[in-house]
Amino acid sequence: DLALRRPSYADQDAATLADLKFAWRGEHLRTFIQVHNLGDEYIIETGFAPIPGRWINVGVGFDLR
């Protein structure tokens, strides 16, 4: 899945933020990898706090039934 958003904040140029997710599900196992802020954009979202740069989440789940 690819998610695009284009937030705009006062006194900043607008930037396109992209998040990407790959997921796989088997009978008893599921895995995923997510990449957030794929383009490593710099935006100050609230106050003086910038959003994190690019970051990655990885997960594995098991069904024990």
Image: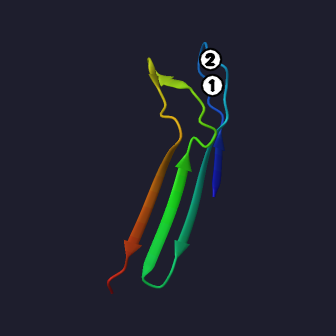
Residue to which mark 2 is pinned: 12
Residues packed near mark 2 inside 10 Å, few (<14), some (14 to 19) or many (20 plus): few
Q: Residue at x 51, y 59 (%)?
A: 33
**Vertical position of residue 12 compared to residue 5: above or below:** above
Q: Is label 1 in a helix, a strand or a loop?
A: loop
User: Which residue is situated farthest in the top direction here?
Assistant: 11
Residue 30: % across, % down? 46, 73
Residue to which mark 1 is pinned: 8
Residue 58, quarter of picture:
bottom left
Q: Residue at x 61, y 43 (%)?
A: 38
Instruction: Name which residue type carries label 1.
Output: Ser
Q: Which mark is in front, 1 or 2?
A: 2
Q: Residue at x 59, y 15 (%)?
A: 10
Number of disc labels: 2
Check contact, mark 1 vs mark 2: CB within 8 A: yes
Mark number displayed over residue 63: none
Task: Give the image's coloring scheme.
Answer: rainbow
In the picture, the quarter occupied by the C terminus is bottom left
Looking at the image, residue 62 sits to the left or right of residue 53; the answer is left
Residue 64, quarter of picture:
bottom left
For the residue pair 28 and 40, the one nearer the viewer reads as 40
Tell me the distance, in whole angstroms, between the alpha carbons under discs 1 and 2: 7 Å
Looking at the image, residue 62 sits to the left or right of residue 37; the answer is left
**Vertical position of residue 58 compared to residue 61: above or below:** above
Residues packed near mark 1 inside 10 Å, few (<14), some (14 to 19) or many (20 plus): some
Q: Residue at x 55, y 67 (%)?
A: 23
Residue 32: % across, % down? 50, 64
Instruction: Name which residue type carries label 2.
Output: Gln
Q: Is label 2 in a helix, a strand or a loop?
A: loop
Residue 1: % across, % down? 63, 58
Residue 11: % across, % down? 61, 12
**Vertical position of residue 35 compared to residue 14: above or below:** below
